[in-house]
């Protein structure tokens, strides 16, 4: 991802700090948005969907701890990297910050070079974690969510979309029993009205391609992928 495609939200009630941080991040080529309090931060985070949020702890209206908690509960922002910015004592702030869902910490005053180094490291971690989630191995099968492909015993297979999504769901938590209703809602959603037999047919096709023992039927409940 190019720097110009990376969005960073900077939140602080001190205009001077906002200006300094924004100036340096803009100079590096990042797309920068700002907010002056926690309430505004939550609103802008929901609207802009930033890759990284630099969030002050002590702010009026809503502090950074509460804002972080709300952001983490927002759909689409669960994986956004959040680093706190604070001049408070490390013991309380760090513990409270990490409990709220923060990924890291930056202590004021912030030197531009240190800030840029920290930002690059956080974004590298974000990229690595995202890639790890999209390409993973379970039960000897490599699942590539980006390309809708799998590799089984060294052989690459391209599955029909619904088969792939069903496999992806079951392998997301190996050995967990997924209920039929949850499978229907996740894989088919509101696209079409389907019945339980539709799941059975797709499971049968996956068994034919990947092996019968990998998929276990739990009667009256649903299915699970056996790792």
Image (cartoon, rainbow, N blue to C red):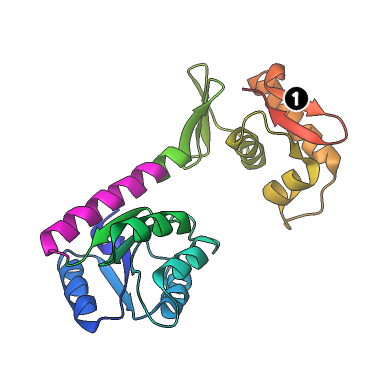
Give the residue at mark 1.
Answer: 216
149 in relation to 87, above or below: above
Residue 49 located within the stretch drawn in magenta: no
Q: Is residue 79 left or right of residue 11?
A: right
Of residues 12 and 116, which is closer to you in this image?
12
Instruction: From the top left corner, tell me how far across and down residue 127 is, in percent.
Output: 34, 47
* Secondary element type, mark 1: strand
Q: Is residue 112 left or right of residue 98?
A: left
Residue found 86% across the figure and 30% down from its top: 219
220 in relation to 127, above or below: above
Q: For the C terminus, which image quadrant? A: top right
Of residues 111 and 49, which is closer to you in this image?
111
Corner quadrant of residue 190: bottom right
Instruction: From the top left corner, tell me how far across and down residue 2 is, in percent.
Output: 26, 56
Instruction: From the top left corner, tell me how far across and down residue 82 is, in percent.
Output: 37, 59
Of residues 82 and 44, which is closer to you in this image?
82
Magenta stretch in the rendered image: 110-129
Residue found 43% across the figure and 66% down from its top: 65
Q: Is residue 85 left or right of residue 212?
A: left
Corner quadrant of residue 192: bottom right
Dot 1, how many residues are within 10 Å of its Cα: few (below 14), some (14-19), or many (20+)?
some
Residue found 79% across the figure and 35% down from its top: 222
Instruction: From the top left corner, tell me how far across and down residue 81 is, in percent.
Output: 38, 56
Magenta residues, dominant SS class: helix
Residue found 24% across the figure and 65% down from its top: 30
């Amino acid at each position: 991802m190019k720097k110009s495609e990376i969005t960073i939200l900077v939140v602080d009630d001190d205009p001077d700090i906002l200006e300094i941080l924004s100036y340096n991040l803009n100079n590096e080529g990042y797309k920068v948005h700002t907010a002056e309090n926690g309430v505004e931060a939550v609103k802008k985070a929901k609207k802009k969907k930033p890759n990284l949020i630099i969030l002050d702890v002590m702010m009026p209206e809503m502090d950074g701890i509460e804002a972080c908690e709300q952001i983490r509960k927002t759909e689409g922002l669960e994986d956004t990297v959040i680093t706190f910015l604070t001049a408070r004592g490390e013991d309380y702030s760090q513990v409270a910050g990490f409990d709220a869902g923060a990924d890291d910490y930056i202590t004021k005053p912030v030197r531009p070079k240190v800030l840029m180094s920290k930002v690059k490291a956080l974004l590298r971690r974000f990229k690595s974690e995202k890639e790890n989630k999209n390409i993973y191995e379970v039960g000897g099968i490599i699942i590539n969510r980006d390309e809708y492909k799998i590799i089984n015993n060294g052989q690459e297979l391209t599955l029909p979309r619904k088969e792939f999504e069903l496999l992806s769901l079951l392998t997301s938590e190996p050995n967990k029993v997924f209920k039929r209703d949850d499978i229907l809602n996740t894989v088919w959603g509101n696209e079409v009205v389907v019945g339980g037999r539709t799941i059975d047919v797709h499971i049968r096709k996956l068994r034919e391609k990947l092996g019968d023992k990998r998929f276990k039927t739990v009667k009256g409940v649903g299915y699970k992928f056996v790792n």
